[in-house]
Image: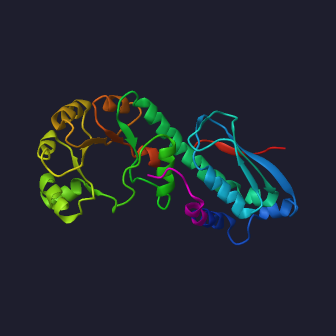
Amino acid sequence: MIETLPDVMLAEIVTATLREDLGRGGDITSQALIPADKMWNAALVARGEGVVAGLALARSAFTQMDEKALFTPRKADGDAVKTGDVLAEISGNARALLAAERTALNFLCHLSGIATLTRRYVEAVKPHKAKICCTRKTTPTLRFLEKYAVRAGGGANHRFGLDDAVLIKDNHIAVAGNVRSAVMKAREAVGHMVKIEAEVDTLDQLRTLLDAPVDVVMLDNMTPAQMTEAVATVAGRFTLEASGGVTLDTVGAIAATGVDVISVGALTHSAPILDIALDDAA
């Protein structure tokens, strides 16, 4: 689980993003209009209600363009904000800040959107015990940032990649023969420190795993009634995860069944941005 974003994890991806935006000639608009030594005071301002995530990326963008730029946060990742709230103040070379503006905002708006949507799901499952969890349905190369944003919104992280844990899904089962034999083969192949999760879409499949060496079972696209029966059947033997087509309209009823985890792909693949602007602070 990613709780913070160390600078060493950010520099390379921010550099690549700035390079993409600057192209071969840099910000020719600012170069044409603004004196090279012009200084500017600006502020990152929320234009909607939500949860902040990604301030360290914004800081990295501005300070990579102007190493003397002063970035002063007024909010922290995970904070709830409303329209007009100042997230950070920035002062530095005007050309540099303007060249970094879009990179900073792209990261900040996107990650804050994920944190905002996650917070809505987390609030929707209260007072039940279920944790809201993300998936691997992430933007290529941005997974660690998007999973960080989920944490900022109060959610939990699923595995980060194929090497984190065994997750036996329907296609694995189709090749292996059945879900129980797939679990047994997996346990023979991996070390005792590796967790095994198996996906089932029927209660009969679930019952075959009651005495199997499995750590988590994913209930795929089951109804709340089926999930409730699954919780009673398992009786705490292993963790139960609900998955498949979860929405804000249905997540409360899913949590009420007593499942332990609810995984939601929409947190990372469908979250709208939180609108944030870089405004003149003079």
User: In the image, is residue 124 part of the stretch drawn in magenta?
Assistant: no
Residue sitting farthest toward the front? 192
- Image height of 105 relative to 162, above or below: above
Q: Nearer the viewer, residue 35 or 86?
A: 86
Residue drawn at x 87%, y 58% is 38
The image shows a total of numbered marks equal to 0
Answer left or right for 21 relative to 41.
left
Answer left or right for 69 relative to 264.
right
Answer left or right for 44 relative to 128.
right
Quarter occupied by residue 239? top left
Numbered range of the magenta stretch: 1-12
Q: Nearer the viewer, residue 250 or 116?
A: 116
Q: Is residue 277 visible?
A: yes
Give the colour scheme of this rendering. Answer: rainbow
Residue drawn at x 15%, y 61% is 185
Instruction: Give the x, y percent position of residue 129.
Output: 35, 33
Instruction: Give the x, y percent position of residue 207.
Output: 12, 42
Instruction: Give the x, y percent position of residue 115.
Output: 52, 42
Quarter occupied by residue 48? top right
Quadrant showing the C terminus? top right
